[in-house]
Image: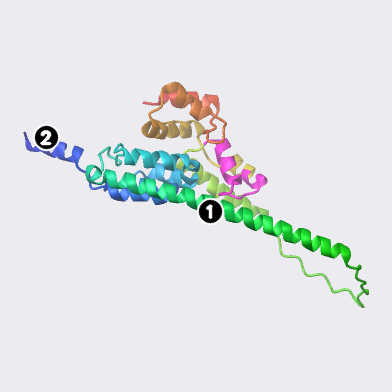
Amino acid sequence: MSTTAATDYKSATITGKSFVVTWLLSLFLGGLGIDRFYLGKIGTGVLKLLTGGGFGIWALVDLIITLTGNQKDKQGRPLEGYKQNRKTAWIVTAIVWVLNVILSVVMVFTLTTVVVAAVEENEAAAETNNTMPAPTYSAPAQAAPPAPAAPAVPKSDDRAQALSSAQFFSDDMHMSKAAIFDQLGSEYGKYTPEAAQYAVDNITADYKTNALEYAKILQEELSLPTEELREQLASTSQYGAKFTPEEADYAIENLK
């Protein structure tokens, strides 16, 4: 075997990325996309972070892919140490899942108990108040002056911040106009509808190019058939990309 062939074979079969590290990051910090940052997949790592691990679904899928030995680094190389540690990883993961289920049941039971106790206490207090004579009050000699109102935050600042966030979502996340609007108004963005609308109306964005770049990410990560990829791009569901049909068609036509 030649030196070049040996080097290619070694780089294709050995990687500096550890299976154990990837598995632990995926198990405990998968919702933040830390496992993908570790593997060098920065773009999808940021996307995973902003969507809360794909609302939990993406984080679970990545964990399963890692546990089954199908996770690769950015160069498509397998993780080191999978065969030696896969059994331990499965056992520990199962234990963590069981403990999470038990903890969830305990928390639900405790919360239910607290709520029931609070309701019973309020009912008892209401019954006590109903049996007591109504108190008499004397008018105050002089009303206290009203407290000064807090200064309102200028709307222009809110719009400027929303515009900056929207430009980031377009340039770095390749999101559609509708998806950017939803993201700005979500629990992560917390902008007013007016500020979000101002932002999407004033950013500099080529949504056809965004659709193409987003399609490349989906094709790399999920390997979807063409029609399913088109549907995902044009989907207006909660998890859809929300590109227009024209933008989705452009992405499919130009995807290599």
Q: Which residue is mark 2?
A: 5
Location of residue 171 in the rendering, given as x and y in whole percent from the top left corner: 47, 42
Q: Say if 91 sits above or below 131 in the image.
A: above
**Stretch in magenta:** 176-196
Location of residue 113 in the rendering, given as x and y in whole percent from the top left corner: 63, 56
Q: Which one is in front in this view, the residue at disc 2 or the one at disc 1?
A: 1
18 vs 108, left or right, is left
75 vs 199, left or right, is left
Location of residue 111 in the rendering, given as x and y in whole percent from the top left corner: 60, 55
Quarter in which the C terminus is drawn: top left
28 vs 50, left or right, is left
77 vs 217, left or right, is left
Quarter in which the N terminus is drawn: top left
Q: Characterize the magenta stretch by its predominant secondary structure.
A: helix
Q: Which mark is residue 106?
A: 1
Whether 180 is among the magenta residues is yes
Q: Secondary structure at mark 2?
A: helix
Q: Secondary structure at mark 1?
A: helix
Q: Residues within 10 Å of mark 2 (few under 14, many from 20)?
A: few
Q: Is residue 40 visible?
A: no
Between 193 and 69, the one nearer to me in the picture: 69
Between 72 and 112, the one nearer to me in the picture: 112
